[in-house]
Image (spheres, rainbow, N blue to C red):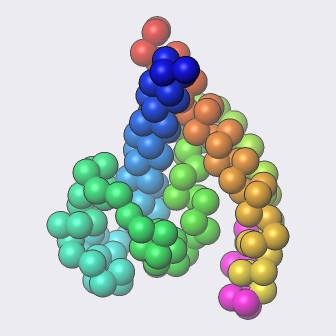
Amino acid sequence: MGRFLIEETEVMETDEQVCRKLLSQNIKRFRKRLGFSQLDLSLELEISTAFLSDIETCQKWVSPKTLAKIAKALKIEVYELFKPDEADHGMEIDAGISTEVVKYLDSVDDTLVKQITHSIQPALERAIRRSVAKTRKYYEQQMEG
């Protein structure tokens, strides 16, 4: 039983590391796509530039509230902060939501978005878990090769 717990702990640490890396890469990618500097984004988020830099270098983690603020400032959904960039990995990631649905959600009222997001939350969580697993597998293959 102790061995299982040790293995489970190691897996959770690996998952956290993958999530931190995805988060940092995606914040930088979406920030640059909008033409924001770290200063621009930190002012928008009302956080220090040092804290944003720590997030982007995997040194600090963020609260759910800050995640939501980051996604809103970057004009994306929260799950996109944890979605691997297909161009970086050369693999298809099934996020469980089509581009058309995301565009539609961007165009509707915030209240409706919250209702829709709540109803599809389980699918999003499964998609994130699949993405993390595929990313981990990709990195393991790179380390072996």
In this rendering, the answer to whether 37 lies above or below 92 is: below
Asked if the magenta segment contains residue 92, the reply would be no
The rendered magenta stretch, by its main secondary structure, is classed as helix
In this rendering, the answer to whether 135 lies above or below 6 is: below
Magenta span covers which residues? 102-111
In this orientation, does residue 143 appear? yes
Q: Residue drawn at (47%, 46%), measured in percent from left and top?
A: 19
Query: Quarter holding the N terminus?
Result: top right
In this orientation, does residue 7 appear? no
In this rendering, the answer to whether 12 lies above or below 69 is: above
**In the rendered view, does 39 fall on the left or right side of 130?**
left
Q: As rendered, which of 10 and 72 lies closer to the eye?
A: 10
Q: Residue drawn at (68%, 39%), measured in percent from left and top?
A: 130
Q: Residue drawn at (21%, 75%), measured in percent from left and top?
A: 48
Q: Residue drawn at (58%, 50%), measured in percent from left and top?
A: 83
Q: Where does the image place residue 26, in percent across and percent down from the top left?
A: 46, 54
User: Which quadrant holds residue 4?
Assistant: top right
Please give the count of numbered marks on the rendered protein.
Answer: 0
Extreme residue in the top direction: 145
Extreme residue in the front direction: 1
Asked if the magenta segment contains residue 107, the reply would be yes
Q: Where does the image place residue 33, in percent across and percent down from the top left?
A: 45, 64
Q: Where does the image place residue 34, in percent across and percent down from the top left?
A: 44, 71
User: Which quadrant holds residue 6?
Assistant: top left
**In the rendered view, does 73 fall on the left or right side of 135?**
left
**In the rendered view, does 3 fall on the left or right side of 36?**
right
Q: Where does the image place residue 9, in percent across and percent down from the top left?
A: 46, 32
**In the rendered view, does 58 fall on the left or right side of 67?**
left
